[in-house]
């Protein structure tokens, strides 16, 4: 896995750099294969990125008719709930760009978490051309990931049994009491995330420095963080902001097994 580190002082600058890379990858995928598939992340950090993708010049440089959007995880709340990942994307991105509604695949909220996870996996299998019994995992062109201070990514939390999942594409999650909000969630599993052609981590804030440094420096403490288990066969890029960039100056590019 090739890891690239992009560390800048502000979230706005980091989001701008990330947006430019999203445009580049989307254009390349559409030119090569006729479509671009991306899994979105939630939390507050990607808000700025989504706004930049919805504004110029990014908006006009992406063929939104050929973009297909999915989610890496979701809180089991209504779509219009303030902490819904779908609502964040809708308000900052989806409502601002000419993407066909049928190209948007939010994680379902109308069923119990286990059933919602099964439904979303069925939708993914249909889209990516997998039969119900076919083994293997889909390949997203780009997966956006965030990370919490505890090192969780998507809704893969420390100590969760879902971290050991090897078969399912989507799983229900009961988060720790410290998660905000502490409601059931759905998440893509590690085998799906690790199959992504390109992975982007969007991480901002000094409270996350310890976990990021341990993960990227492969220290003894790294294994406690779920984000350490992300191991794409392609490129993984970390867009860091509002952290001490000196911690990562010696690892701007790194090859990891």
Image: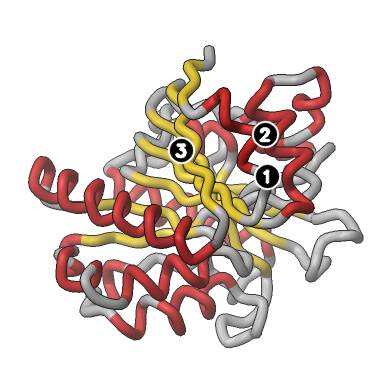
Considering the numbered disc 2 on the image, is that residue within a helix, a strand or a loop? helix
Please say if the residues under marks 2 and 3 sit with CB atoms less than 8 Å apart.
Answer: no
Quarter location, residue 247 = top right
At 33% from the left and 39% from the top, the residue drawn is: 130
Q: Which mark is residue 58?
A: none
**Residue closest to the eye, 146 or 208:** 208
- Determine the CA span between mark 2 and mark 1: 6 Å
For the view shown, which residue lies furthest in the right direction? 177
Q: What residue is shown with label 1?
A: 244
Mark 2 Cα within 10 Å, few/some/many (few <14, many 20+)?
some
Between residues 247 and 145, which one lies in front from this camera angle? 247
In this picture, residue 99 sits left or right of residue 159: left
**Is the C-beta separation of discs 3 and 1 under 8 Å?**
no
The percent coordinates of residue 177 (x first, y second) are: 91, 60
**Alpha carbon distance from label 3 to label 1:** 17 Å
Of marks 2 and 3, the one in the foreground: 2
In the structure shown, which secondary structural element does the residue marked by tag 3 occupy? Answer: strand
Q: Quadrant of residue 95?
A: bottom left
Q: Is residue 197 left or right of residue 156?
A: left
Reading the image, the residue beneath label 2 is 247
Q: Where, by quadrant of the figure, is residue 141 drawn?
A: top left
Task: Look at the numbered discs 2 and 1 and tell me whether their residues touch, using CB distance below 8 Å.
Answer: yes
Distance from Cα at disc 2 to Cα at disc 3: 16 Å
Q: Is residue 12 above or below residue 33?
A: below
């Amino acid at each position: 896995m090739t890891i690239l580190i992009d560390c800048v002082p502000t979230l706005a600058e980091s989001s701008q750099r990330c947006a430019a890379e999203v445009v580049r990858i989307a254009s390349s995928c559409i030119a090569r294969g006729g479509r671009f598939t991306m899994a979105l992340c939630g939390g507050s950090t990607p808000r700025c990125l989504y706004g930049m993708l919805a504004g110029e010049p990014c908006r006009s440089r992406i063929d939104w008719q050929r973009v297909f959007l999915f989610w890496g995880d979701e809180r089991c709340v209504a779509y219009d709930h303030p902490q819904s990942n779908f609502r964040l994307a809708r308000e900052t991105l989806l409502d601002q760009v000419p993407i066909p509604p049928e190209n948007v695949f939010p994680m379902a909220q109308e069923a119990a978490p286990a059933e919602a996870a099964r439904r979303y996996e069925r939708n993914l299998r249909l889209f990516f051309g997998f039969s119900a019994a076919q083994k293997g995992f889909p390949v997203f062109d780009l997966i956006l990931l965030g990370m919490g201070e505890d090192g969780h990514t998507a809704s893969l939390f420390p100590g969760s049994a879902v971290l050991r999942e090897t078969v399912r594409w989507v799983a229900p999650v009961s988060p720790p009491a410290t998660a905000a909000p502490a409601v059931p969630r759905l998440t893509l599993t590690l085998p799906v995330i690790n199959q992504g052609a390109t992975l982007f981590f969007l991480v901002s804030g000094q409270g996350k420095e310890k976990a990021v440094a341990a993960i990227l420096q492969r220290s003894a403490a790294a294994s406690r963080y779920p984000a350490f288990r992300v191991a794409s066969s392609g490129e993984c890029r970390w867009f860091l902001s509002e952290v001490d960039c000196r911690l990562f100056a010696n690892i701007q590019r790194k090859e990891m097994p």
